[in-house]
Amino acid sequence: MFFYILKKLDWVLVISVLLLCGIGLLSIYSTAYTKEAKIFYKQMVFVVIGFFLMLVFASLDYRIFRNRPGLLIVLYILSVLLLVGVLIFGKEMRGAVSWFRFGPLNFEPVELAKLVIILILAEYFSLRHIELYRIRHIIVSGIYMLIPVALVFFQPDLGSAMILVFLWLGTMIIAGIKLRQLLILFLIGLIIFLIAWFVVLKPYQKDRIISFINPYLDPLGSGYHRIQSVIAIGSGELWGRGLGHGSQSQLRFLPDRTTDFIFASIAEEMGFIGVMLIFVFYFLLFFRIIKIALSASNNFSRLFCVGACIMFVFHVAVNIGMNLGLLPIAGISLPFISYGGSNLLINFITIGIIQSIAVRNK
C-alpha cells in the first residue's frame, strides 16, 4: 500500500517543495554564524520530519475529515484553546506573545489554527455552497473565523489575523458568494479597520504602516527593516554576491535574515537568478495544487485545495511584498524557505492532505 501511495504522489509538487526547502537551507547555512549554526541543523531536522509527516497524511484517507465533522470540531476547539493558552502562558518574542516554549523548541499555535480553519471552511461550504445566498451561512462561517482571529489579534499578530480573514473571504468567493454580499463585507471590514486604527492598534503597528509609506521618516527605527531589505535586494544584481558574501546579511545590517527577510538575503547572495528559481518553484507549487483542485471528485477536496493555495499565495505575496518595500511589514514567513518549525511542519501536513486528495482522485 505504501509503495502504491508513493507511485501515485504528485511528484512535481513534492520536488517543488523540496527544492524550496533546499534554497532555504542554503540561505540559512550561509547567513548563520558559528554560534547560530544550530538553526541550520534544526531546520534540516524539521524538513526531514515534515517530509515524513507529508507521507503519513498522504497515506491517510482525506475523507476522514470530510465524513467526520465531529473530528473537525475537536480540532477547532483544540486550536482555540491553544490560542487562549498562548496568551496566558506563551513566551513573548519581538513584542508578540505567539509562542509556547518547550526547551530549545518553540510552537506557534496560530499555524495549526490556519490548517484547521481551511478544513472547517471546506467542510462547511461543501455542504452549503448552493445556499450561500442565505446570510446565516456567512454569519456562522464568520464566527468560526472570528474567534481565532480575535485571539491572534490580541497576541498581537496582525499578519496571521489577516491570513485567517483572507482564507474565509477566498473560500466564500470560490464557494459562490454574491457580489453584493462581498461588497457589504468589504465595507464592514473598512469600518473595523478604522476602529482598530484609532482604538486597538498599538503605536509600533501604526509605525510599521506609516514607515511603509515613507521609511525615511525614521530610517533607524520603524523604517530600518524596509530600507536594509531593499538595499540587500538591489545589491544582488544578476548573479548575486555569492553564498557567504552578502554584506547586508553577513554583517547583520539585515534583520531577521533567516525568517521574515530571508528573501532579501537570498536576493543579495543568489541574485536575480536565485529569485527567479524561487518564483518558478512557487509557480509549480500553485499550479499543481490548482490542478489537483480542478480534478477533485467532491466539493470538500476542491475547497480544501483552494484554501491551502490561498494560504500559500498570501504568505508568498505578503512576505516578498514587504521585502521589496511594496507592503507593510507583517511578520509573515516565506513558505518552505523561512526558518521555523511550526510553519514548516504544518505546511508539509497541508501538502500531505493535498497529496491524499490527488492519490484518491487518480
Image: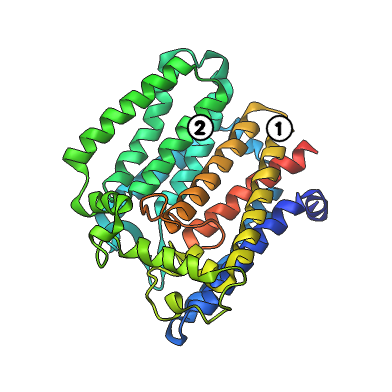
Q: CA distance from mark 1 to mark 2?
A: 16 Å
Residue picked out by circle 2: 170
Q: x, y percentage for residue 95? A: 26, 60
Q: Dot 1: what SS?
A: helix
Any part of residue 52 in sight: no
Q: Nearer the viewer, residue 295 or 314?
A: 314
Q: Position of residue 168 (x, y in %)?
A: 46, 32
Residue 177 appears in the picture as rendered: yes
Q: Are marks 1 and 2 in contact (CB under 8 Å)?
A: no
- Closer-to-camera residue (60/157): 157
Q: How many marks?
A: 2
Q: Amino acid at mark 2?
A: Gly
Residue at image location 51% in from the left, 57% down from the top = 334
Mark 2: few/some/many CA within 10 Å (<14, 14-19, 20+):
some
Quarter of the image that includes the C terminus: top right
Q: Secondary structure at mark 2?
A: helix
Q: Label 1 amino acid?
A: Leu
Residue wearing tag 1:
294
